[in-house]
Amino acid sequence: MRQRRFQRGRELAIDLGTANTLVFVRGEGIAVFEPSVVAIDEASGRVHAVGEDAKRMIGRTPATIRAIRPLRHGVIADFDITADMLRYFIRRVGGGGLSFSRVVLCVPSGITDVERNAVEEATLAAGARRVSLIEEPMAAAIGAGLPVAEAQGSMVVDIGGGTTEVAVLSLGGIVVWESVRVGGYELDEALVRHVDANGHLLIGPETAEAAKIACGAAWPLPEKIETDVAGRDRITGLLRRTTIDSSEVRAAIAQPLETIVDTVKRALESTPPELASDVANRGIVLAGGGALLRGVDQLLSSETGLPVLIADSPLECVVLGAGSSLEETAMQGRTARRGGFRRRRRRS
Ligand SMILES: Nc1ncnc2c1ncn2[C@@H]1O[C@H](COP(=O)(O)OP(=O)(O)OP(=O)(O)O)[C@@H](O)[C@H]1O
Ligand SMILES: [Mg+2]
């Protein structure tokens, strides 16, 4: 038999998010943290840029280049572009080509079998050798350091770009789960509508996101923060700047925030009493970029009457959790393999 030399595969954990994609390399840590954006040259159909470079092009591209976010609400909206993006990131960490990486991919809990197959296939198409899936709330809870394996209830709320997922975990499983297709982007859109309705000023979603990060709040702040936004005046058609402050942003985003709060309340209502009392003692843990919104912990605490804590690295805890599960599954040899692939024998 002819001997073929294969480079040793890398083991990766990937959080393929609506807003950001993170890649964790076993033994190294987080190697990629980039926006989930791809710029495509429409004339040639080729990928022009990926990640941060592509994000800068949103709304600023010439006619032939289109900047695309290939995921919507945590699931794939454009299969080929998602695979292109994954291929680019996997190659960048040295896991493409002949090295056949093994990948643990984070997926939202509520996705359908079709969506599940799509992310698996996209990861295989991107050059992964084997793919196993981990549910995002589980990964987030592990990454936030919650005792998920113990006979104790832990509640995690992951407010991402396109979804909010709420889960109560105990004994290594998800006991209660609720999700809503509302995340940071819905807050940005609400701010776009508010600035238009109140100031007749049309701002782009990226401008709204920057303003939300600069001065947004979910709870009254001791001191107002202000920021400038630029857009097009709806009446004169001219470019114009205006100043908005934190209380204005708070009013603008109140409605989508209420939807997020209601989702958390629904999860609490269906939590069995023993686990609910654990959550009441230990508190709710917030993860995802939305956890960084000022006062979101106070809002949730006031609405639920429970203590609310923010995970140490909210944007990273999903991939960190998946990364540590990678270490565990490697030890236990529990990797799922795609049916269509032959088992490759280890060379001794
Ligand atoms: N400092 C901040 N204040 C408020 N929001 C923030 C802040 N930093 C990031 N965000 C928001 O967090 C969101 C991105 O979070 P995250 O990376 O967790 O999402 P994602 O995992 O890509 O999305 P999903 O899990 O829904 O697929 C964006 O909407 C962004 O505007
Ligand atoms: Mg996420």
Image: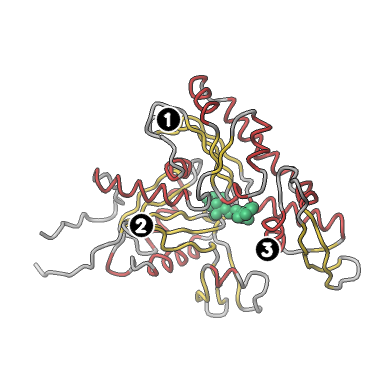
**Circles 3 and 1: CB distance less than 8 Å?**
no
Dot 2: within a 10 Å radius of its alpha carbon, few (fewer than 14), some, or many (20 or more) residues? many
In space, the residues marked 3 and 2 are separated at their CA atoms by: 30 Å
Q: Residue at x 18, y 70 (%)?
A: 5
Residue that label 1 marks? 170
Instruction: Name the element at disc 3.
Output: helix
Q: Amino acid at mark 1?
A: Ser
Q: Which residue is mark 3?
A: 206
* Figure quadrant of the C terminus: bottom left
Residue found 55% across the figure and 26% down from its top: 280
Label 3 Cα crowd, 10 Å radius (few <14 / some 14-19 / many 20+): some
Q: Name above or below for residue 238 compared with residue 133.
A: below
Q: Left or right of 73: which side holds 190? A: right
Q: Position of residue 290 (x, y in %)?
A: 61, 49
Residue under numbered circle 2: 12
Question: Which amino acid type corresponds to the residue marked 2 in the rendered image?
Answer: Leu
